[in-house]
Image: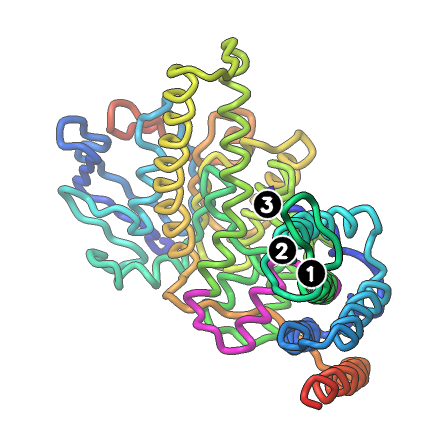
Amino acid sequence: MIDEPFTNLDSFIHRLDPRTRFVVALAASVIIAIVQQPVIAAGGLACGLAAAGLARLPGGALLKRIAAVNFFVLLLAVFLPPGVPGREAFSIGPIVYSFEGLEKAGLLAMKANGIVLVYTALVSSLHLAELGHVLAHFRVPKKLILLYLLMVRYIYTLEEEYLRLRKSMRTRCFSPGLNLHTLATFGQVVAILLLRGFHRSHRVLAAMKCRCWRGEYWLLDHFVFGRRDLAFAAVSMAMLSVLLTGFIR
Amino acid sequence: MSETAFKLDGVSFAYDAARPVLQSVDLEIRIDQRIGLTGTNGSGKSTLLQLLVGLHSPTAGTVEAFGEPRREEKDFFDVRRRAGLVFQDPDDQLFCPTVAEDIAFGPLNLRLGHDEVHRRMASAMEMMDLQGYGDRVTWKLSEGEKRRVCIASVLAMEGDFLLLDEPTGDLDVESRDRLAAVLEKCGKGFLVVSHDADFLDRLCDRRLVMENGTLKDRE
């Protein structure tokens, strides 16, 4: 259910302190999101490509992720330009596409892809659990972190239970169709999953109490911020400053 | 004579008043005793273990653990520190992202120092043959591996007594033998719920049977 194709790789990015990656990704995404000039947005896209290159992300999985985002970008490219007034670039029947509209769609496409690339390279390359620890280091309330980690953990268990139920349905010749029986059956599956989840939550809490849990979540190890992180943060901030300066001017 | 780990006096319990699970159970367990508990499915074996560590409150009778009467939730913190419970379903017990974090969860809750937590973690992982598993994600392990991590997570608490609810459930023969060897050598008493007669014969000096909510010593 949750796929992590960008973790467990060996690259310069993967060896960085997760906190550095998270902060740089956050800063980059904010700056790329606010720029309005196509040249600077192209710079943001270049930063994203550079980060993806440094993280040595697998091409297939990366393209799949970018394709998902670009489906929406494509919708924007089709529907946005006719709504922006300006000089006519071309028309399809009564629908007129303006240069200004196309430029705006291009700008959004570059910004969206830039941000997705930066996040994929810097944040999606973290294990979901590492992300929880990063948030803990940034003083996000511990209860929220615990809820996040438990959610990540038990999505897999819910998926396993769902697949077991589906298997059990198949072995008794259930084949889904557009009918009341299918709707009722899936309704029961959802109800069973909710009930089992509810009961499991009680058992998990009991197991936590058995190991002397009293509401606090302690981290086993802490991240180390080293020279490599300092260099990466400095170079990233310099590049982002250039983008920001260009935007302000 | 060794210390009493648990003493139940006339303990009854029911999830639903119409169907009692435990009926006036009397039991005394010494801290160095090695007890095997069998019984039919649904006879209340797991409930008994959970009652010993305060996860359920008896509807009648008294629970005494490590020489003290235990009634309220706060009374059981010390019991849980001294008696580790391995749950029947590993997915209930393993909730931390990685094996290392799950094994360290208990020692961290005891507010032990970094070095002590790592020592206990390494020792428990070695006992359960889990070296190299530290960074593995718990929910992606096989059922047998999950079971071994569960046992390691309780061993890392370094308590005085172990409560094990069907610990051999998902283990292959090799892992089962390893667990038996660990329990033989650990120098602690334990109460094991299991349907595995060979495992119990090898380890236990006392055998109990649960029938219709009551406990009997097996002849």
**Image position of A78 with respect to A239: above or below:** above
**Image position of B145 with respect to A43: above or below:** above
Distance from Cα at disc 1 to Cα at disc 2: 6 Å
Residue A45, image quadrant: bottom right
> Which residue is situated farthest in the top direction here?
A173
Give the numbered dot on residue A47: none
- Residue at x-position 40% and y-position 32%: A190
In front here: A51 or A108?
A108
- Residue indicated by mark 2: A82
Distance from Cα at disc 2 to Cα at disc 3: 49 Å
Q: Which amino acid does label 1 sit on?
A: Ser
In front here: B52 or B206?
B52
Q: Which amino acid does label 2 sit on?
A: Pro
Disc 2: host chain: A
Give the numbered dot on residue B139: 3
Along the polypeptide, which appears first: circle 1 or circle 2?
2
Q: Is residue A122 magenta?
A: yes
- Residue at x-position 56% and y-position 44%: B183
As helix, strand or loop, the secondary structure at mark 3 comes to helix
As helix, strand or loop, the secondary structure at mark 1 comes to strand
Is residue B108 something one can see in this rendering?
A: yes
- Residue at x-position 70% and y-position 45%: A92
The span picked out in magenta is A121-144
